[in-house]
Image (cartoon, rainbow, N blue to C red):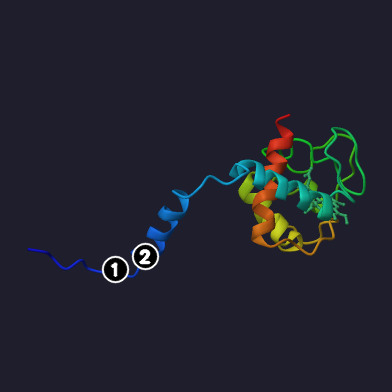
Amino acid sequence: MTYPVPIVPGLLPAFGIVLMTLGPAPAVPADEAVLAKGERVFRNQCRGCHSLTPGTHIAGPSLHGVVGRNAGEVEGFKYSRVLQASRLVWTPEVLDRFLADPDALLPGTRMVFWGLPEDARRPLIEYLRHVGQQ
Ligand code: HEC
């Protein structure tokens, strides 16, 4: 005797994902792909104003090791009052909000930047964290 199999629509997409992960392994491991995308975003959107070398400031402060450190504390860079007084810590979550719309998080910041979409912020923050560990 066979039982009818209930079809639950909500389960179908999840099942599709399981099937995909069982497929052939991608040529590049996910991590490296994410970091490569993050590096590209940094090169195109940030590098004009920020270096990743400790102590090297351009229009903005060096971003070496920025993930996890206090805002406005890089030696030798003159911040705006609003950033210096912000008492923020650049956790991935706070960075994510800042990079989505700098002026919304810190009205009056000197970082004039229109903001990044989510699919660029995630890999960029991963990349910044990775570079900071080297
Ligand atoms: C047009 C130049 C410019 C661009 C482009 C730019 N920044 Fe900035 N950034 C600045 C300036 C200037 C400051 C200092 C802001 C202040 O003092 O209010 C800053 C500050 C920051 C800070 C705070 C650093 C600290 O030590 O507290 C972070 C984090 C940051 N930028 C990340 C980024 C990232 C990531 C990108 C690329 C998506 C980017 N910025 C693009 C100019 C820029």
Q: How many marks?
A: 2
Which residue is located at x 29 percent, y 68 percent?
8
Q: Which mark is residue 128?
A: none
Residue placed farthest to the left in the image?
Answer: 1
Residue placed farthest to the right in the image?
Answer: 58
Q: Quadrant of residue 76?
A: top right
Q: Quadrant of residue 56?
A: top right
At which x and y percent is residue 99?
72, 56
Query: Which residue is more in the foreground, 65 or 19?
Result: 19
Which residue is located at x 72 percent, y 46 percent?
36
Q: Quadrant of residue 6?
A: bottom left
- For disc 1, the marked residue is 8
Q: Is residue 106 rendered to the left or right of residue 32?
A: right
Residue 81 seen in this snapshot: yes
Q: Amino acid at mark 1?
A: Val
Give the vertical position of 8 relative to 129 (above or below). Answer: below
At which x and y percent is residue 72?
79, 43
How many C-alpha atoms fall within 10 Å of the one at disc 2: few (<14), some, or many (≥20)? few
Which residue is located at x 71 percent, y 50 percent?
37
Residue 89 seen in this snapshot: no
Q: Which mark is residue 12?
A: 2
